[in-house]
Image (cartoon, helix red, strand yellow):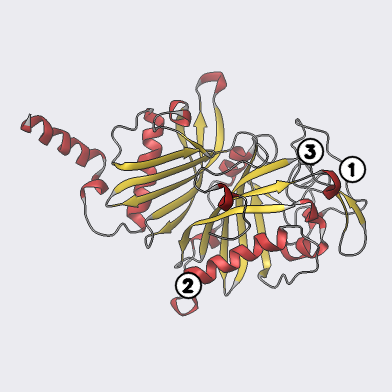
Amino acid sequence: MRIAAALALALAALAFPQATKSGPCDRACLESFADQYMDALIAHDPRGLPLSAKLKNTENGQRLDPGDGFWRTATAKGKYRLFVDDPQTGNVAMITTMTEATGPQAVQVPIAIRLKIENRQIAEIETFVVRTGLSGGTGAKELETLGNPNPLFLSAIPPAERASRDDLIKTANMYFSALEKNDGKGNYSFFADDCERLEDGQQTTHNPNFRTGSGFAAAPGGRGAPKQAEPAPPPVAGFNPATLGCKEQFASGYFHFVTRIRDRRFVAVDTERGLVFSFVFFDHAAGKYRSYKMADGTDASSGPTRPWTWELAEMFKIENGKIRRVEALLDQVPYGMLSGWSTWEEGMSSEPR
């Protein structure tokens, strides 16, 4: 028995060398755990992973046993990957792509992953698989075409200019607070002049070609339903917010139909690179909230025609207290759904966590 146990430990050390070390888990260590996790998904087998006895695992907000859900269908890793490493809390979060199923049914999907590492073991797994998304599930193709994230996300902030994790979270949360019931009358100075946003691999700022009728900045329908789910409402005449920058979009008051942004969980912060990774829900109450006046007095009717919730993984690049880049994945979920990591009260709250 002792020989068999020793052999098992030796094999585990070869397969997962980070699990056999001690001490803090730095950037390379955290990212290696993410790779191990994706390899285990593809193998459809969690048994080789260094899982904590107190492991909690969710997929798209649902509590599942390791080995269930996406564990059964993941078949390959993509090349796009954008990390937020947080050695201080042991969290690593990422936006990446993977392939689901095989043969003619195989499809690439964008996913967000968060792992919490404690004592070189995985204590928490949070996986967000986007199968519909901004334009009916093409986000992975868009990200794979990009190949690599914007280099700005990977650049280090000079040490003298680095903000604290609390200040980074505060700035990121300003984005959500300004978007909730957006009226164009707020202070949007937290945006850098060169701010751009990518959602499901598509640029939704300074992009006149983005008019799908389903996205965040799309004139016909805003953050409403994908075309295949319901017809897009008519656009605001002569107005396409996708042609504007981040600050100008918010200042227009166009996004008033986003009635609640809740369960704002800031799960990983990289102070060296000025990155904040969040999971959040955008509620659209529909009904009377679809009709409103924009900041210039223009009458608008936009947003979904029925109660609608987007679940999002949203990442921010912040420099000198200003947001320069935003990257997000989003997927439609049942209206009012919770994350699996919050109480009902926390899940319904717009307060940051």
Residue 181 falls in which quadrant of the image?
bottom right
Is residue 278 placed above or below 99 in the rendered structure?
A: below
Q: Residue 128: horizontal and vertical position, in percent?
A: 53, 41
Residue 52 falls in which quadrant of the image?
top left
Q: Earlier in the sequence, mark 1 or mark 3?
A: 1
Q: Is residue 172 left or right of residue 180?
A: left
Q: Of residues 160 and 165, which is closer to you in this image?
A: 165
User: What's the residue type where badge 2 is placed?
Assistant: Ser
- Note whether residue 29 is visible: yes
User: What's the residue type where badge 1 is placed?
Assistant: Pro
Q: Which residue, as the protein is rendered here, is positioned at the far front? A: 345
Name the residue tied to disc 1: 234
Q: Tell whether label 3 touches label 1 (CB within 8 Å).
A: no
- The N terminus - image quarter: top left
Say the numbered circle drawn on residue 16. Answer: none
Cα distance, mark 1 to mark 2? 44 Å
Cα distance, mark 1 to mark 3? 15 Å
User: What's the residue type where badge 3 is placed?
Assistant: Arg
Instruction: Identify the element where label 2 is drawn.
Output: loop
Name the residue tied to disc 2: 164
Q: Image point 80% across, 44% down: which residue?
A: 286
Which-is-in-front pick, marks 2 and 3?
Answer: 3
Name the residue tied to disc 3: 306
Q: Which residue, as the protein is rendered here, is positioned at the far top? A: 104
- Note whether residue 314 is visible: no
Which-is-in-front pick, marks 1 and 3?
Answer: 3
Q: Earlier in the sequence, mark 2 or mark 3?
A: 2
